[in-house]
Each structure stands twice: as structure tokens, then as C-alpha cells.
């Protein structure tokens, strides 16, 4: 009999990764039994840590930003993209002291983003360029709106402490945005689902050697994640109780994210759709020029496990 591996999966404290928390709890409570592997969620504080963990093999897999997964694959990290972990679920929040009424008001100000290679950066770029504004780093020539990369959990406090309104807002995965809104210093400007309906963002990847060596353990885990996704969509208030604990957030904040409106974030359609990933890659290569070369997405995406799990 093959040895029973401990599969270390990196994640952040964001709603995009809630299905991992649900699966972990089901196993801990004995509601599901993993016969072929042991799940070990590994909490990270920011996206660079997650990417580094995959690159240096200290993680076996991760819930990671789709474009970051593509970039790691392109740089030679042998990965397989197994599932989407959610659809939609991010938010553009404006600071109450920054006097932002329309997109053009972001000009001359800073906006926090979680990572360069993120769907958040892509959606905000699209929003700005449609109004003739150029996003970029402070000090770059011709830039209208200054982007600053920051770990998601740090964003609310940094914006709160900026009394002058220099930091106009941030675009990030929930529940970070709703946390700032509930605390009274942020306001919703856009939900990501209204910028790109039903968009992918985070994906579940594993290192290729793990998928090859322990396919039974990976099937087991994928099956459970798909079930967890369906459970979140079916019973958001019950999921919010688990989510509050997993994400270290107030239950009311998590429940609002999961249910108001109902399609703010969805976890019932996790099948990895290559066309959706191609849209991200094409935009980041052709419009943003932050990806230099395109990868063959067919080589990154492995739908075997999603199909077997009955993912929609």
C-alpha cells in the first residue's frame, strides 16, 4: 500500500478560499474521511509567500491567483491547475475621505492592489483605461493612478490611517472590503461581478509530482472541495459560521459577502474553463503587457479530477 501523504495547501484568509476551510472542518469533525492522504492547510499572509511556497516545493499545492499560477508555470514550476476555487467575490472599495464619486476621481491618487498578476489588477486596469486613465507605479511617466501592491489583510488599516485621502481605495478579495465598509471608513464602489460577471480569480493548483504520485489523495480532496462549494452556495448562513472562524472575521461580515447579493461570490461552478483563463492571459499580455509570453493553457489545466468530482 502506498504511503499516506500529508498534502500541504497554501491559502490566504479570504472568502475565495473558504471551500478549503469547509473541507478541513469536515475532515476534523469526522464528517468526511480521507483514506489516501492527510490535508494540511497552510496559512500565508500574502501572494508572494504562496507563490514562493510552490516554487520551492514547501507547499504541495495552493489556492492561488490564476495569472500567478500561469506565471509560475511559465517560469518552469511544474504545476497542474485542478479547479477554480470560486467565481466573482472581489470588491473595489473607496475611502470615505478621498472624495471619489466617479472613476476619473481616482486620478492623482493611490489604489492598493493585492498583486500585479491578479484579476484585481486586470479589472481595475480595464475600468481606468476605458476612461482614458493610465494606471502604473508612482514615478512612472504619464501615470494617472498610482498602484501599490499590498497584502490583502493589511489594506483596511493602511487606508483607515490615511486621513488625507491619498489612498483612494483598494480592490481585493472579500471579506477584506466588507470589513472596511462595516468598520465605517470604506464604501463600496464596484463589485467585481459587475465588471466581469461570473469571473474566475483564484484556482487550486498542485505540483505535478504530487498529482502523479498521489492521484487517489488528490481525487479525494477535489471531490470534497467540489462538495464544499455546493454547500456554501446552498447554505450561505451556515457557511458564514465556519467562514467567520476560518477567516478570522465577524460572522455578519462573512454572511453579507456570501449572500448580499446572492451572486456576489459563488462556489458552485468550479470546473476550470480554459476560455476564461485565456481571457485573463490575453488581456495581461496584449493590453497590460505585464505578461510577456503566453503559455499553452491546455498543458497547465488538468480537468481529470474536476470531471471525476462532477464539478460544474
Image (cartoon, rainbow, N blue to C red):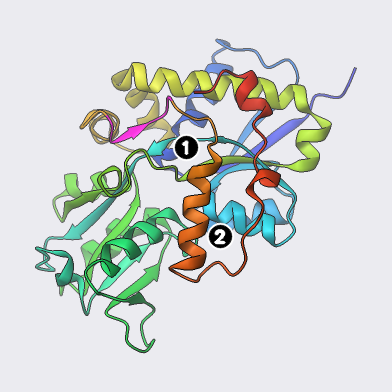
* Label 2 to label 1: alpha-carbon separation: 16 Å
Seen at 64% across and 31% down, the residue is: 303
Indicate which disc residue 217 carries.
none
Q: Answer above or below: position of 149 versus 200.
A: below
Between 11 and 142, the one lying in front of the other is: 142
- Residue 120 at x, y = what percent? 38, 56
Q: Residue furthest top?
A: 31
Check disc 1 and report its element: helix, strand or loop: helix
Q: Circle 2 sits on which residue? A: 48
Residue, x 9% and y 63% (percent of image)? 101
**The one of 121 and 255 positioned closer to us in this rendering:** 121
Q: Are marks 2 and 1 in contact (CB under 8 Å)?
A: no
Split into 4 quadrants, where in the image is the N terminus? top right
Is 98 displayed left or right of 145 in the figure?
left
Q: Which type of secondary structure does the marked residue at label 2 adopt? A: helix
Q: Residues within 10 Å of mark 1 (few under 14, many from 20)?
A: many
Q: Residue at x 64, y 41 (%)?
A: 301
The spot of residue 30 in percent (x, y) is 58, 11
The residue that disc 1 covers is 17
Give the main secondary structure of the magenta stretch.
loop
Residue 250 appears in which quarter of the rendering? Answer: top left
Q: Nearer the viewer, residue 142 or 264?
A: 142
**Residue 135 magenta:** no
Q: Could you say where residue 217 lies in the image, as x and y percent from the top left?
A: 73, 24
Residue 265 on the magenta segment: yes
* Total number of numbered discs in the rendering: 2
Q: Position of residue 41 (x, y in %)?
A: 59, 36
Please tell me which of labels 2 and 1 falls first in the chain.
1
Kindly tell me whether residue 193 is visible in this rendering. yes
Please name the residue shown 27% across and 80% down the image: 144
Using the rendered image of the protein, determine whether residue 37 is visible from the camera's viewpoint.
no
The region drawn magenta spans 263-268
Amino acid at each position: 500500500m502506498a504511503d499516506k501523504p500529508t498534502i500541504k495547501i497554501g491559502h490566504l484568509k479570504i472568502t475565495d478560499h473558504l471551500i478549503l476551510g469547509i473541507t478541513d472542518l469536515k475532515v476534523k469533525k469526522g464528517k468526511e474521511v480521507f483514506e489516501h492522504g492527510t490535508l494540511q492547510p497552510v496559512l500565508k499572509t500574502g501572494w508572494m509567500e504562496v507563490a514562493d511556497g510552490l516554487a520551492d516545493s514547501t507547499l504541495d499545492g495552493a489556492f492561488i491567483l490564476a495569472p500567478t499560477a500561469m506565471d509560475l508555470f511559465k517560469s518552469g514550476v511544474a504545476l497542474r491547475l485542478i479547479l477554480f476555487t470560486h467565481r466573482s467575490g472581489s470588491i473595489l472599495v473607496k475611502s470615505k475621505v478621498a472624495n471619489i464619486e466617479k472613476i476619473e476621481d481616482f486620478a492623482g491618487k493611490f489604489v492598493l492592489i493585492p498583486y500585479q498578476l491578479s484579476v484585481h489588477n486586470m479589472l481595475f486596469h480595464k475600468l481606468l483605461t476605458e476612461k482614458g486613465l493610465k494606471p502604473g507605479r508612482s514615478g512612472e511617466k504619464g501615470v494617472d493612478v498610482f498602484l501599490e501592491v499590498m497584502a490583502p489583510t493589511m489594506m483596511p488599516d493602511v487606508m483607515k490611517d490615511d486621513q488625507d485621502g491619498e489612498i483612494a481605495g483598494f480592490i481585493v478579495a472579500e471579506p477584506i472590503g466588507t470589513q472596511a465598509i462595516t468598520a465605517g471608513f470604506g464604501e463600496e464602489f464596484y463589485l467585481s461581478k459587475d465588471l466581469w460577471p461570473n469571473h474566475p480569480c483564484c484556482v487550486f493548483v498542485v505540483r505535478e509530482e504530487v498529482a502523479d504520485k498521489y492521484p487517489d489523495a488528490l481525487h479525494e480532496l477535489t471531490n470534497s472541495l467540489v462538495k464544499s462549494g455546493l454547500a456554501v452556495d446552498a447554505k450561505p448562513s451556515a457557511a458564514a459560521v465556519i467562514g467567520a472562524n476560518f477567516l478570522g472575521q465577524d460572522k455578519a461580515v462573512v454572511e453579507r459577502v456570501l449572500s448580499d447579493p446572492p451572486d456576489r461570490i459563488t462556489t458552485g461552478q468550479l470546473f476550470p474553463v480554459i476560455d476564461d483563463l485565456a481571457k485573463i492571459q490575453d488581456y495581461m499580455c496584449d493590453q497590460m503587457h505585464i505578461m510577456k509570453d503566453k503559455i499553452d493553457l491546455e498543458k497547465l489545466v488538468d480537468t481529470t479530477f474536476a470531471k471525476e468530482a462532477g464539478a460544474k
